[in-house]
């Protein structure tokens, strides 16, 4: 068991996501930054995408109550293990009673804590990913308990990886989405030449961008959306749907983020700058 | 019958969007659902695929694979052209109990005033229609219902409420619906339905599917309270009638 001593700003359990219920309106959920979590699963030799903690901006304080192996990735959050600094993408052996805590946000926005074998919390509709009201809670609270199975004698083939970090990347690569062809030349110019700022309205459901592009009067019937869909409101605001984003929407879907661009955006916070590039 | 024309559009690298003419039509919806059944049964069989129908469109999305848009759209056009008549699946008309007590029908009096009708007339119009589920989205289990009585059409509220309770029954423009969970909302609230439309503890968390029909019938506040208790302990059973679509 992992015990939450202090919950931090917004920590959730996430796995690969909740599939097959989109046609009932259930968002996919799952880790926002799949690239970082894939590396952690590789390092810990987890066969399936495992359930991890997704830690946002300000980290929790956690105590491990059983032996295991752990690795951190994604954002750099000045993590310490029993008050000694630890690195991202390195396997640490955990003893009963070890305490992990986090400090200043150095880079990125979402950090991931993975254990050998993954967390084994309750599954709802085939997934451990938090999403209220499908799951009881939308985030971990003080004194919550997160189960995992004891892991002894794991010999990692690689104990540490140097990563090509994309935390500094500021270009979101996109491809066409269904209403792309309805955009005017001026709107296209706006989207692909402006520098955008991430608005403070950003969370696991959607990221808004502060700068607007020219408005539109396109009206359409409600239709499906997916994580990474960029919607354009009539006033010219761009809204990027993320993993907890609604499964249908009535705004034109103008471009679609690539898988990597979703990960890049997931590591951005309010005030960060970025640009959009069609590939 | 000639099939309505389709348009296939790229939607990122994992998805394509098939679109039918831009209108709210049961004929189009039936065609979409017919094609969806064929694709789910014959083509996109493995569990990497998901299909999402709504009004005049059908999303086809793959979890991991990068799709070859040109190749796939040419296949889709062929499959659509060769689509054969097939037995219709079981469809249901769900009859849902609504309490129009003013405790729940927060906007019932205002709606009646704005439409220059009595509350009784508003309730009669709301319970008198048979609605079609054109889509499910926005929230888990949120149904987009078409088929509202024209006399009951009015704009959404000027200022949305920060909090609308679970089960709230609303109308806005040409749409009717039920909030399946507490959420912010701008629809005019005229009652409450105690039967949960979405229940994550059930293997099939939402008994309604796109293409089903919905009717509302009036119950008293006392009966609503009883239904609510049933729902809380999980023994509710929505009343359904099998229909031939």
Image (cartoon, coloured by chain):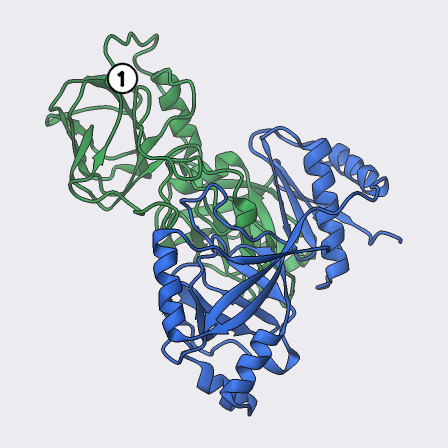
Quadrant containing the C terminus of chain B is bottom right
Q: Position of residue A46 (x, y in %)?
A: 38, 18
- Chain in blue, by letter, is B
Chain A palette colour: green
Quarter of the image where one finds residue A96: top left
In depth, the one of B93 and B18 nearer the eye is B93
Q: Is residue A226 visible?
A: no
Quadrant containing the N terminus of chain B is bottom right
Q: Position of residue A257 (x, y in %)?
A: 54, 42
Q: Residue at x 62, y 28 (%)?
A: B46
Query: Are there few (<14), some (14-19), or many (20+) residues within 10 Å of tag 1?
Result: many
Q: Position of residue A249 (x, y in %)?
A: 56, 57
Quarter of the image where one finds residue A108: top left
Query: In this picture, is A265 found above or below B2?
Result: above
User: Which residue is disc 1 drawn over?
Assistant: A91
In depth, the one of A108 and B171 nearer the eye is B171
In depth, the one of A214 and B207 nearer the eye is B207
Q: Residue at x 80, y 36 (%)?
A: B74
Q: Secondary structure at mark 1?
A: loop
Q: Residue at x 81, y 42 (%)?
A: B80
């Amino acid at each position: 068991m992992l015990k939450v001593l202090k919950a931090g700003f917004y920590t959730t359990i996430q796995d690969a996501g909740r599939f097959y219920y989109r046609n009932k309106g259930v968002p996919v959920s799952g880790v926002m930054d799949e690239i970082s979590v894939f590396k952690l699963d590789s390092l810990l030799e987890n066969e399936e995408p495992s359930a991890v903690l997704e830690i946002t901006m300000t980290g929790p304080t956690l105590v491990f109550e059983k032996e295991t192996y752990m690795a951190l990735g994604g954002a750099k959050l000045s993590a310490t293990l029993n008050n000694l600094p630890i690195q991202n993408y390195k396997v640490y052996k955990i003893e009963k009673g070890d305490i992990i805590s986090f400090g200043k946000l150095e880079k990125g926005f979402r950090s991931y804590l993975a254990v050998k074998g993954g967390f084994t919390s309750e599954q709802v509709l085939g997934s451990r990913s938090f999403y209220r009201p499908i799951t009881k809670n939308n985030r971990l609270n003080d004194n919550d308990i997160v189960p995992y199975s004891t892991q002894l004698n794991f010999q990692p083939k690689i104990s540490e990886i140097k990563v090509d970090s994309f935390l500094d990347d500021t270009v979101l690569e996109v491809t066409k989405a269904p209403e792309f062809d309805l955009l005017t030349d001026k709107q296209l110019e706006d989207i692909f030449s402006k520098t955008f700022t991430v608005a403070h309205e950003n969370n696991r459901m959607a990221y808004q961008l502060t700068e607007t592009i020219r408005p539109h009067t396109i009206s359409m019937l409600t239709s499906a959306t997916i994580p990474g869909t960029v919607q354009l409101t009539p006033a010219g605001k761009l809204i990027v749907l993320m993993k907890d984003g609604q499964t249908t929407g009535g705004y034109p879907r103008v471009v679609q983020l690539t898988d990597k661009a979703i990960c890049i955006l997931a590591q951005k916070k309010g005030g960060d700058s970025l640009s959009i590039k069609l590939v | 019958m000639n099939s309505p024309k389709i348009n296939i559009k790229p939607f990122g690298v994992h998805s394509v969007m098939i679109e039918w003419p831009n209108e709210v039509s049961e004929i189009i919806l039936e065609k979409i659902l017919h094609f969806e059944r064929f694709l789910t049964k014959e083509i996109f069989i493995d569990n990497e695929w998901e299909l999402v129908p709504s009004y005049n469109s059908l999303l086809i999305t793959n979890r991991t694979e990068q799709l070859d848009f040109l190749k796939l759209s040419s296949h889709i056009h062929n499959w659509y052209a060769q689509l054969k008549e097939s037995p219709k699946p079981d469809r249901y008309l769900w009859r849902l109990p609504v309490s129009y007590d003013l405790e729940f029908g927060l906007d019932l009096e205002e709606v009646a005033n704005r439409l220059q009708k009595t509350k009784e007339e508003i309730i009669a119009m709301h319970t008198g229609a048979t609605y079609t589920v054109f889509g499910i989205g926005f929230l888990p289990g949120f149904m987009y219902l078409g088929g509202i009585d024209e006399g009951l059409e009015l704009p959404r509220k000027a200022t949305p409420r920060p909090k609308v309770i679970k089960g709230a029954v609303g109308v806005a423009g040409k749409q009717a619906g039920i909030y399946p969970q507490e959420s912010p909302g701008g629809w005019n609230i005229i009652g409450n339905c105690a039967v949960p439309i979405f229940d994550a503890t059930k293997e099939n968390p939402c008994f309604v599917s796109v293409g089903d029909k919905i009717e509302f019938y009036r119950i008293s506040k006392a009966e609503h309270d009883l239904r609510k208790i049933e729902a809380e302990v999980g023994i509710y059973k929505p009343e359904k009638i099998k229909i031939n679509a």
